[in-house]
């Protein structure tokens, strides 16, 4: 069952990201991205991480997608984007992608052995929250400061300039 | 289900996101490609947390998601500003720093 779910979610994720590459409309791209994020949330749930799965669905497939949809709505894009004219960008991109693919495969081949067996209560939200508020308390608080700075910064950037 | 297949899936997703970033030319889709790459890294981190039976990977994913939310807010505001000033979101026409 888990294997079947893994392959189903993997095919959905890779397929929607691939469809995003070939589609030219931003609204369709946002839709494909939402599908990919939801399927990734399912993959996180398969990996004994229910809290991360819930956060993924809420923040990525919810909040960030709403932001994208709002910006696509505000930007008026009638003309489709013609394909890239400079061919050397394609070659450079393919070269970089093959390079990083080989590098990542080499990293995966040299992984150390898995030591212990995952107990089922390790990924529970309670243990995660306990770790978050003890060992990682300072990063947590710094993250809240970061979010406040981001809110103020984006409000400042996107405000309407008054005409003088 | 071995976590190694999750690593391979995250590798494929990262490379696909990189391809989308390099091929696409509008800023919004490139931004989406960045989010895909972040998600691929998140998947690798959660798989590593399961592989080595440690919760630290999931904590890092939590922080990555919050930072990605902040980054999306600021980045989309910047894209909106670029559109207001130049009336386009093609990434190759944003060349203010070009000498």
Image (spheres, helix red, strand yellow):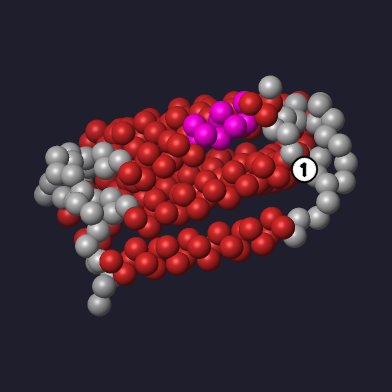
User: Residue A114 in the image: x percent, y percent?
Assistant: 83, 47
Q: Residue drawn at (68%, 60%), measured in percent from left and top?
A: A107
Q: Residue drawn at (60%, 32%), measured in percent from left and top?
A: A7
Looking at the picture, tell me which residue is in the foreground, A156 or A88: A88
Where A84 sits versus A22, above or below? below
Q: Quadrant of the N terminus of chain A?
A: top right
Looking at the picture, tell me which residue is in the foreground, A105 or A65: A105
Where A21 sits versus A126, above or below? below
Q: Residues within 10 Å of mark 1 (few under 14, many from 20)?
A: some
User: Residue B14 in the image: x percent, y percent?
Assistant: 52, 50
User: Residue A54 in the image: x percent, y percent?
Assistant: 59, 26
Q: Within the image, what quadrant is residue A126 found in?
A: top right
> Farthest residue toward the top?
A1
Q: Within the image, what quadrant is residue A63 found in?
A: top left
Q: Is residue B13 left or right of residue A125?
A: left
Q: Is residue B71 visible?
A: no
Magenta segment range?
A5-13
Q: Residue drawn at (67%, 42%), measured in percent from left and top?
A: B5
Residue to which mark 1 is pinned: B51
> Farthest residue toward the bottom?
B99
């Amino acid at each position: 069952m888990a294997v079947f779910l893994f392959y189903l979610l993997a095919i959905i994720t890779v397929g929607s990201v691939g469809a995003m590459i070939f589609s030219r409309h931003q609204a369709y791209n946002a839709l494909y991205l939402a599908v990919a994020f939801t399927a990734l949330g399912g993959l996180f749930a398969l990996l004994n991480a229910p809290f991360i799965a819930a956060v993924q669905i809420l923040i990525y497939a919810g909040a960030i997608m709403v932001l994208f949809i709002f910006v696509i709505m505000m930007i008026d894009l009638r003309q489709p984007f013609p394909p890239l004219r400079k061919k050397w960008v394609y070659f450079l991109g393919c070269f970089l992608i093959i390079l990083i693919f080989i590098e990542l495969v080499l990293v995966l081949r040299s992984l150390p052995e898995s030591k212990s067996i995952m107990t089922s209560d390790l990924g529970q939200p309670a243990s995660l929250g306990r770790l978050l508020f003890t060992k990682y308390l300072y990063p947590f608080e710094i993250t809240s400061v970061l979010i406040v700075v981001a809110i103020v910064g984006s409000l400042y950037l996107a405000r309407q300039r008054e005409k003088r | 289900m071995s976590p190694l297949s999750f690593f391979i899936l995250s590798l494929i997703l990262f490379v696909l996101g990189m391809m989308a970033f390099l091929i696409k030319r509008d800023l919004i889709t490139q931004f989406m490609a960045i989010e895909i790459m972040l998600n691929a890294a998140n998947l690798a981190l959660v798989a590593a947390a399961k592989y080595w039976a440690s919760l630290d990977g999931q904590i890092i994913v939590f922080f990555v998601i919050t930072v990605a939310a902040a980054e999306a807010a600021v980045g989309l505001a910047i894209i909106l500003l670029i559109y207001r000033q130049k009336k386009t979101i093609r990434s190759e026409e944003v060349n203010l720093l070009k000498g």
